Image (cartoon, rainbow, N blue to C red):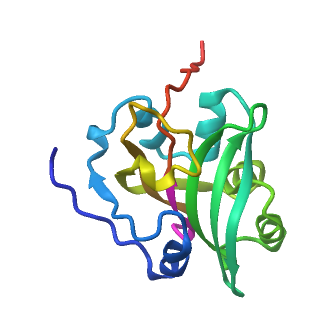
Amino acid sequence: MKPTQSPIIPTELTPLLATSLLGSTPLAWLPASDIPQPYQQLLVHDHDMTSELAKFHGDTITLTVLQAQHTDHLYLREVTLHTATSGTTVEYGLIEILLDSFPPDLRSRILAGNTPLGTILTTSALPFRSQPQGFFTVPADTLATIFQHSPTGKILYGRYNHLLREDSTILARILEILPHQPFPLITDH
């Protein structure tokens, strides 16, 4: 494996990270090319994760907020994303949302905490892009209370991502981690 420089996680995420399930678990950074399929398909792209997960699983994605911290300009939350039909957990995440970067109508939808940020963005008129900052692994046991145990899965794959407006204003910074399980591959034919 090639050495990879670690991205700098913003200090604003530190309080949430400290109280999250991820806690002080070290992130083992790796090049995008070292991520195996189907994680490569799900993580290495410049789209929002919610849309990619919906397409991959062939289902609508729902949100559960595990904890949240809110100041005037910043909204931090620990979340899980699930398939709507079966309720299967398909992502664990920590997200820093810069509320001042959003129009007021989207801020209220974000703070309601019942719709994934990716869904809010893709259904709004606000143009945005995703800019992955790095890819990592964590031990699967770290999130054993979130994801079903897999006898073959010792590590989980994730990415540190920025969501940006067209003018490069940061909308959100996100640590996104996927479960280890045999996913059905859904492709467009």
Q: Quadrant of residue 68?
A: bottom right
Residue sitting at 69 percent across and 57 percent down? 117
Q: Look at 29% across and 56% down and name the residue there.
A: 28
Q: Which residues are magenta?
A: 166-176
Q: Nearer the viewer, residue 158 or 119?
A: 158
Q: Is residue 76 above or below residue 115?
A: below
Q: Main secondary structure of the magenta part?
A: strand
Q: Position of residue 48 (x, y in %)?
A: 58, 48
> Could you tell whether 32 is left or right of 17 in the image?
left
Number of marks present in the image shown: 0
Q: Using residue 119 as the reference point, say whether residue 57 is left or right of it.
A: left
Give the quarter of the figure containing the N terminus.
Answer: top left
Quarter of the image with the C terminus in it: top right
Image: 70 above or below 7: below
Residue 31: image x %, image y %? 26, 47
Hey, which residue is sitting farthest top in the picture? 189
Give the residue furthest to the left.
2
Q: Is any part of residue 166 visible from this angle?
A: no
Q: Is residue 85 above or below residue 47?
A: above
Between 162 and 116, the residue placed more toward the observer is 116
Decide if residue 103 is in sight here.
yes
State yes or no: residue 102 in magenta: no
Locate residue 166, reporting x and y percent.
57, 61
